[in-house]
Amino acid sequence: MKYKKITLLMAMGILGLILSGCSDLTVLNPKGPVGQSQKDLIMYSLWFMLGIVVVVFGLFGYMIFKYRDRPGRGDQDYDPELHGNIKVEILWTAIPLIIVTLLSIPTVETLFDLEKPPESSNDKEPLVIHATSADWKWFFSYPEQDIETVNYLHIPTDRAIEFRLSSADSMAALWIPALGGQKYNMAGMETVLYLQADEEGVYDGRNSNYNGEGFSLQTFKVYAESEEDFNQWVSQIQNEKPKLTQEQYDELLEPGIIGKMAFSNTHLEWVDHGKMMDSDYAVKQHFDAYNQHLHIKSLNVEEEEGDDNES
């Protein structure tokens, strides 16, 4: 009896931890239509599968109880029908097909909807932002506004954002949990991700694909604000921030962690990492910087060995 109470308390404690953690899951508290549609699909799938679990375990318990061993049962003749049952075989084939169908239809519909701008902002053209990943930082280029930010971005609310994703070197994945799911950034090709914020606020973004020692610090902030505030911010960047030069951009591409920066032009003037013909540009910069790093590290090791020999 004592062990049953302990087991029950442990189960209640684990259940409490799980339920308390659910309230902090950003993906279940979306701030835009894309995240909301994905949440709806997640909840539909969870409740659907929970129903299946309840039915399966209910039947399991019923079978165990009904056919349990009990006094006098051993005296009965056991004559199982081994030839098969067509009705049961049709049933256990049809049920999984129905389950898969009921899960597949809303999933496929949602996936196709995510490849288009949200319908709630069809009256406005999507804001185009080129999101370029580099070890271990983010470049956000606004071609229409001719500005660029590093490791942070501003977006207007109630307007679709068309992220054009690419990478300057290793593969990454842009993820803003409060607004929607992630999509991959790859060198030499461009993927498109539509997101939208319906509420003003500051949201966390990050790289969700492991790509080396700086992975955990490849994060950024998303400032969602009114259209008026966004336009004021754009004007401020255009008038107050310096121009980004190609030489400076090449230095920024070198592997490392940097802070927030902003420029009154974009690197798209001389390279677009989403195009195959430009993909070698950053790869060369990356490996040149990496080889230089190894060369400096080798020199430091040789100097340390020399000092040890002299001593």
Image: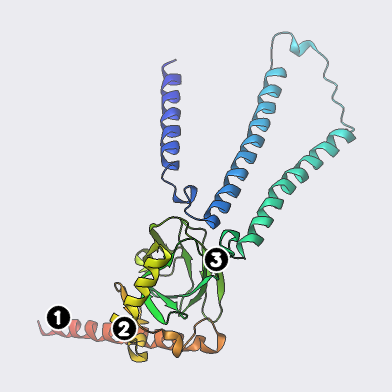
Which circle marks residue 194 in the picture?
3
The mark that comes first in sequence, 1 or 2, is 2
Q: Quadrant of residue 21?
A: top left
Q: Amino acid at mark 3?
A: Tyr
Q: Quadrant of residue 48?
A: top right
The mark that comes first in sequence, 2 or 3, is 3
Q: Image point 37% across, 90% down: which residue?
A: 246
Q: Residue most toward the top?
A: 72
Residue 75 shows in this picture: yes
Q: Indicate which label's residue lies in the foreground, 1 or 2.
A: 2
SS of the residue under disc 2: helix
Q: Can you say whether 31 is above or below 5 in the image?
A: below
Which circle marks residue 293 in the picture?
2
Q: At which x and y percent is residue 100?
A: 72, 47
Q: Image point 47% across, 80% down: which residue?
A: 144
Q: Image point 47% across, 48% down: which residue?
A: 29
Q: Which residue is mark 1?
A: 308
